[in-house]
Amino acid sequence: MKRSVIKEKYIILKGYPFTKYGKAIGKILLIALAGIFGQPTPTDIRDKKVIWDVKARDIEEYTTTFSENAVKATLHTDTQYKMHPERYVLLAVIRKAISGGDTLLLDGKKILKQLKRTKRGRACLKILQKNKFPFRVPTVYTKKRKEDNPEVIWCPVISKRPLLRFRKDTIMRGFACTMENEEMQRAVEYFEQYCNRHKEVRKVLLQRGEIIIMKNDEMLHGRTEFKDKKRHLLRIRMQ
């Protein structure tokens, strides 16, 4: 199973009984599954939750992140705001949305290879690789959880490990509270536009009881917008 994720960048599991025996046993089963891929890690530094509820929340105190709202989640890698992002991400469906909420998938390794074929693509890759970008930590994952007390880390978008760390909104919010750099921002814009319009973006509608496990250091993922606030997934990240 782990070899399949390494080769294909993701797998979808059906029939794993985490919804069969109640919440407590279900979470134990998911942690056991995650342990095949690596060490499950806490989502945030304050509450140390290993299993994170991915569902829309009504929050006014700060800008919500993708796992707390119902808007479209553009293609990204998880924990791009950490110095050492987790290598794998697991998402398990408790309840799918009535409509929308489809998972989007794109092989980042292929995209980097394809960008090298054009002059503009090579210029973009050079900027993403040679410069350190400001990634603002989503407020919910900070210690104080205050919008006016931002935390930022500086890292390249492309490196040896992780091969790719990317999320446009955390980078742009990082620029907003540090310094402006038009060349670097244009590279981010171009890379996101290239990925979003790429013909190899795959759309998958996961059903209740299904699990997707992704290679976070190479696979870009996202989500279409949805209205049903009862949509509920569980997430575990593994290092």
Image (spheres, helix red, strand yellow):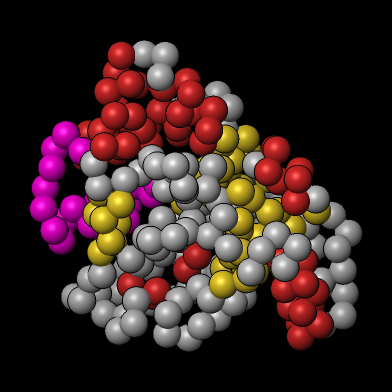
Left or right of 212, for residue 19: right
Q: Is residue 123 visible?
A: yes
Where is residue 201 drawn, in percent x and y? 57, 32
Q: Please say whether residue 98 is one of the residues in the magenta stretch.
A: no
Where is residue 215 drawn, in percent x and y? 61, 48
Residue at image position (38%, 40%) is 158
Overall secondary structure of the magenta section? helix
Image quadrant where residue 174 sits = bottom left
> In what quadrant of the picture does the C terminus appear?
bottom right
The total of numbered circles placed on residues is 0
Residue at image position (31%, 45%) is 156
Where is residue 40 drawn, in percent x and y? 62, 71
In the image, which residues are magenta? 166-184
Q: Can residue 204 be seen in this view?
A: no
Residue at image position (53%, 60%) is 86
Q: Please say whether residue 169 is one of the residues in the magenta stretch.
A: yes
Left or right of 150, for residue 96: right
